[in-house]
Amino acid sequence: MDRGHKSLCLFAEAFSRRRDPESTHTAAMEDNDETKKSKQKTAVICGYPISIFFIVVNEFCERFSYYGMRAVLVLYFKYFLKWDDDFSTTIYHTFVALCYLTPILGAIVADSWLGKFKTIVYLSIVYTLGQVVMAISAIHDLTDANMDGTPDNMTLHVALSMVGLILIALGTGGIKPCVAAFGGDQFLDHQEKQRSTFFSIFYLSINAGSLLSTVITPILRAQECGINTKQSCYPLAFGVPAALMVVALVVFILGSRMYIKTPPQGNIMVKVCTCIGFAIKNRFRHRSPQYPKREHWMDWSDEKYDKLLIAQVKMVLKVLFLYIPLPMFWALFDQQGSRWTLQATIMDGNFGFLTIQPDQMQTVNPILILIMVPVMDSAIYPLIAKCNLNFSPLKRMTVGMLFAALAFVAAALVQLQIDQTMPIFPSSTESQVKYINMMSTPLDVKAGNNNFTLKPFTANEDYLTFGSPFALLLGPNASYPIAIEEGNRSTSVIVQEGTQPTPITFSDTTSKPEQGANAIRFFNGFSMTLNMTWGDQSFGNIPTNDMSTYVLIPQGVAQYQIKNTLGSVCDYKQELGFGSSYTIVIPPTFNFGSTCEQILIPVVDIKPNIIHMAWQIPQYFLMTVGEVVFSVTGLEFSYSQAPSNMKSVLQAGWLLTVAVGNIVVLIIAEAATLEDQWAEYILFASLLVLVCFIFAFMAYFYTYIDPAKIEAEFAHKEPEEEKKRKSVDMSRKSSHSRSEKDEETLQTKI
């Protein structure tokens, strides 16, 4: 393979590693493809079998389906199923772990029982059903009998979601090791060049499908849909991936008659596991000191297995031992789709020329991959080599881990800045109050120990916090005893009733508006009932000195209409950011003239998100550098150190590290009792640094080998050993034959 093509493959491996670790199985396919294919003639276009076009389209649609669903999954848990951040993160990573555990099962079923074609078809049906069930589970009108916009039977939605995710995990995981291998099977022995090009195209289809879906499905989610009430359109965000999975299945089946279908050949992983199992069992049987020790514990299997296989298993185990610390890297890496996405929900996504949804920030990683892989391969690594620095593969992987740890330190710094801008809500034993003066004269206010003066038609800037009942003094003569509502926020509007200022209290929201929306309400201080609308949503008819309910409005320019019973109209525009809450005050001096909007007074209850999503780019950059240095190098190292017929075993081990990494996340998310998210980021970074030192220590004692050379040595020894074995067997048979004759003679004599 020339250097340019190698760069392309490394790019594809790195990009699809984030997207799809199974695509790296391709190298194993090329090396393991020892099965003699039938010489049947297949239709070709430009030297390529027509069948591969069905496989490439199938892979594009399947990757779109999987990553489209996964991009919005954690937000679906948080905002539709109403789970908290920790539980949403736990279920998300449980699902991802399942997706990387099931490929082992899929490979065994395909190689030992059904064959690749049937395995892909049957599990794709399971996969499609899972996607359809997920789309159905997200229809809020399904159980919304009272038409209030909230499902009446959330248990049903949760159950459907879990069934859908399990089916998807079985489907996507089961076909992971099969599709690329099946594509490789379509080429005959003389089509090595075409096969290599196919794998590059296959990589591109993976990348294109995953990247497009990560951009498109958050846009679909941000739409509003529903029969009775309009809400975020999760059914559409899940429905489109489900439709693409149907297309993937149909396209794959349409090419059935054109495929070369190799029968099951037996799975090397099963053979490796049985060999290891026999060695352990045999060693346990001979644990007594009377038995001589052997050089390696795997040598206890040589009574049943040939020495070449044992030597190959030793090489694989040597690499798998180095895999032990690797899950910690994936524990951090895969939180881009969970914790980092949740972090983006409380940030400002307005980039001026476009608005970025929180779940779209995940696309920063593949975009940076496009830049970083060629830069690392063509510039950074050659520069390091010219400096005569020994930047070996294991050292690169160590550096990659450190970059991932730095990414989480950057995430913690961003979280600290976010926390400083977040409102401080009352605890379960406190109450918070804000005061608005609706009188035309300044008003001296004393609330407990707080003294301040409110100008006409203004509010105090911050909420006042109280832990016990207090006296409210308004001016020189009006005094009111105030009982606190624990855990509650309220606005006290002071109006003129007769000669005395009188407070009217309204409950406020006690949390940031979800999904970056803005909670808006109106207070009507005008002398007649007014009706307020935003688009087709109404705030209702608001009497004098009364407050409307909150209406959630997305970021952008909101246009309101204020009408009275006489038909007069006032148009009011308000620029809204993300996650704010406002009380728009209509003062007694309001009129329906051309300057009516200048009279309205917006009072800030909760400030908008002011930390921009662009601040997440450094952490994505550091994580991407870590991914390029760690993942691509790790795969390249693993394949270079493994026997040619056991690269699939390493692929299974690599996928297993991803699964274990996600299990680590859910354990820490549930076990850690850290109140601050930044502290959890630092905890993960610290754990990875610790693991990094352990890995560096293990790597220091690792000795690089040449598997091809070792295999060649055993191949040379095998004929001689076979002759010796036959000679021994012949002598044993001869001896056994003589003893039988002696026994017969003895019996005759008796």
Image: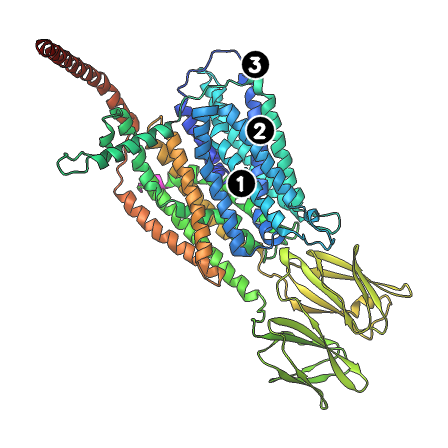
Where does residue 419 sit, x and y in percent of width and height?
53, 64
The answer to which of marks 3 and 2 sits earlier in the sequence is 3
The answer for how far apart the CA atoms under marks 3 and 2 are is: 19 Å
Where does residue 668 sit, x and y in percent of width and height?
43, 54
The answer for how far apart the CA atoms under marks 1 and 3 are is: 38 Å
Residue sticking out furthest to the front: 750
Residue of label 2? 58
- Label 3 element class: loop
Q: Give the range drawn in magenta.
A: 384-389
Q: Do the residues labelled 2 and 1 touch (CB within 8 Å)?
A: no
Q: Residue at x 47, y 21 (%)?
A: 185
Where does residue 347 sit, x and y in percent of width and height?
59, 57
The crowding category of the residue bearing disc 3, from other C-alpha atoms within 10 Å (few below 14, some 14 to 19, many at least 20), is few
The disc at residue 80 is none
The crowding category of the residue bearing disc 1, from other C-alpha atoms within 10 Å (few below 14, some 14 to 19, many at least 20), is some
Residue of label 1? 166
- Label 2 element class: helix
Q: How many labels does the image show?
A: 3
The disc at residue 43 is 3
Foreground of the two, 331 or 622 = 331
Q: What residue type is labelled 1?
A: Ile
The crowding category of the residue bearing disc 2, from other C-alpha atoms within 10 Å (few below 14, some 14 to 19, many at least 20), is many
Q: Which amino acid does label 2 sit on?
A: Asn
- Label 1 element class: helix
